[in-house]
Image: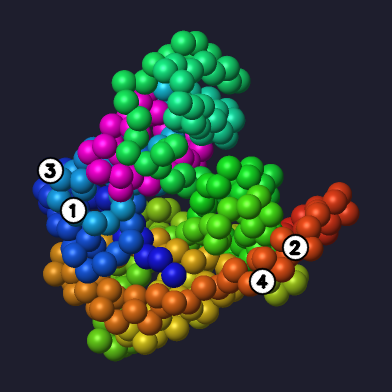
């Protein structure tokens, strides 16, 4: 498994944005020091009670100045809010600043409130995200001095980029999705993906196993990185960790992310956990722990929780958020260090979907026809899957 230090850069009561950013740099320095593989942050806008990170370039540049080893990236740029050629140009500059340590997340965007002030259309977000990826690949996938590109929204001709990224043809791509058609495309182009704890892992297992099979069939080595985001806190004992983290967890999920409005989840009648169940019960610490939706406890417990969840949801990269609620910086540091020294080594060799099984499926030439697609759709619907 691989380990990402993920931050929404939630505001701190009584702290200025500048002070919060300085705290963020100390967090990323620590993640670099103790051995995390990645540091990721979001691009969110117009959300003063939620994220204070609206600039992927600022996050990457600040992290670059304070780290030596860890790979850094946005998770991710929202192309509908930008001219995509600006993102493509910026990616090359950031990869140079990071000396080849950039990871590039491209996200379609989840909140309609981001789009209006930019004059952007929320309903175009997915197509614009794909266009940006296609443009990036066109710009840096050629040895010619210039390139042209025609997409659904933008057209460029005879463009000469000032310089290329360190990583060729371009830095690794991450596109968070659970959509099977998008996952087919990601497998073809060799891009990674991710999801979050509000999607039932049994549903993730269905779509991500196919994604891994498609990845192998496309001839890419190994398996793709599949990320899974949730909140993490480690203490010396289960009781200590839960007692300390619980109020901060509930505050983050219900007051910051606004999961759960006090309305009960609809009855599905099949006993399966659904996204609606997770959202409706986000304020219940026992529900979250019983369903293994947050990873909280002693190092041994947290390792066991992650291992079980990874096997169930077929993810191999944890995107752990360690700073949440009003938890103190000292408490976050202690949790992060415990995680790095005791949890990460216990999971480093764990692979929920190894090469052997994927290679067997690739050799079979797995084909998903219309009847297979219909069966998968019915299974996902039964699992309460929401895209």
Mark 3: few/some/many CA within 10 Å (<14, 14-19, 20+): few
Q: Which residues are magenta?
A: 86-114
Mark 3 vs mark 1, foreground winner is: 1
Q: Nearer the viewer, mark 2 or mark 3?
A: 2
Residue 381 among those drawn in magenta: no
Which residue is depicted at the point 40% across and 28% down? 88
Marking on residue 357: 4
From what the image shows, is residue 159 above or below residue 40?
A: above
Cβ atoms under marks 3 and 4 closer than 8 Å: no
**Percent x, y of residue 238:** 33, 87
Marks 1/2: CA–CA distance: 42 Å
Q: Are marks 2 and 3 in contact (CB under 8 Å)?
A: no
Q: Nearer the viewer, mark 1 or mark 2?
A: 2
Q: Nearer the viewer, mark 2 or mark 4?
A: 2
Q: CA distance from mark 3 to mark 4?
A: 48 Å
Q: Residues within 10 Å of mark 2 (few under 14, many from 20)?
A: few
Residue 94 x %, y %: 28, 36
Identify the mark nearer the N-term, 2 or 3: 3
Other residues around mark 1 within 10 Å, as few (<14) / some (14–19) / many (≥20) = some
Name the residue tied to disc 1.
Answer: 67
The quadrant where residue 283 appears = bottom left
Residue at the disc numbered 3 = 18
Please identify, in this view, whether the residue under mark 3 or under mark 4 is nearer the observer: 4
**Tag 1's secondary structure?**
loop
The residue to which callout 2 is attached is: 363
Asked which secondary structure carries label 2, the reply is helix
97 in magenta: yes
């Amino acid at each position: 498994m691989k380990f990402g230090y993920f931050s929404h850069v939630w505001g701190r009561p009584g702290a200025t944005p500048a002070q919060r950013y300085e705290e963020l740099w100390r967090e990323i320095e620590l993640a670099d020091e103790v051995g995390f593989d990645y540091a990721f942050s979001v691009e969110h806008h117009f959300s003063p009670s939620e994220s204070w990170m609206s600039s992927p370039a600022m996050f990457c540049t600040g992290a670059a100045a304070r780290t030596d080893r860890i790979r850094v990236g946005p998770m991710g740029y929202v192309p509908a809010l930008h001219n995509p050629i600006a993102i493509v140009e910026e990616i090359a500059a950031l990869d140079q600043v990071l000396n080849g340590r950039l990871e590039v997340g491209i996200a379609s965007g989840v909140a309609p409130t981001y789009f209006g002030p930019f004059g952007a259309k929320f309903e175009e977000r997915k197509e614009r995200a794909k266009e940006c990826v296609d443009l990036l690949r066109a710009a840096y996938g050629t040895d010619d001095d210039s390139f042209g590109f025609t997409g659904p929204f933008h057209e460029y001709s005879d463009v000469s980029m000032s310089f290329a990224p360190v990583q060729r043809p371009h830095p690794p791509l991450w596109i968070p999705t659970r959509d099977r058609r998008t996952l087919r495309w990601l497998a073809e182009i060799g891009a990674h993906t991710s999801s979050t704890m509000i999607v039932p892992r049994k549903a993730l297992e269905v779509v991500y196993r196919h994604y891994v099979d498609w990845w192998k069939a496309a001839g890419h080595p190994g398996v793709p990185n599949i990320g899974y985001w949730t909140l993490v806190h480690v203490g010396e004992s289960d009781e200590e960790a839960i007692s300390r983290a619980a109020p901060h967890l509930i505050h983050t999920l219900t007051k910051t992310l606004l999961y759960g409005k006090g309305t009960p989840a609809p009855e599905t009648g099949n006993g399966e956990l659904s996204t609606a169940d997770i959202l409706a019960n986000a304020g219940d610490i026992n529900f979250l722990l019983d369903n293994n939706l947050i990873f909280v406890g002693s190092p041994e417990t947290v390792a066991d929780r992650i291992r079980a969840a990874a096997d169930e949801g077929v993810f191999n990269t944890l995107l752990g958020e360690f700073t949440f609620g009003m938890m103190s910086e000292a408490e976050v540091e202690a949790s992060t260090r415990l995680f790095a020294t005791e949890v990460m080594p216990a999971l480093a060799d764990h692979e929920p979907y190894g090469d052997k099984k994927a290679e067997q499926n690739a050799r079979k030439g797995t084909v998903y026809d219309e009847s297979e697609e219909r069966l998968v759709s019915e299974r996902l619907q039964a699992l309460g899957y929401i895209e």
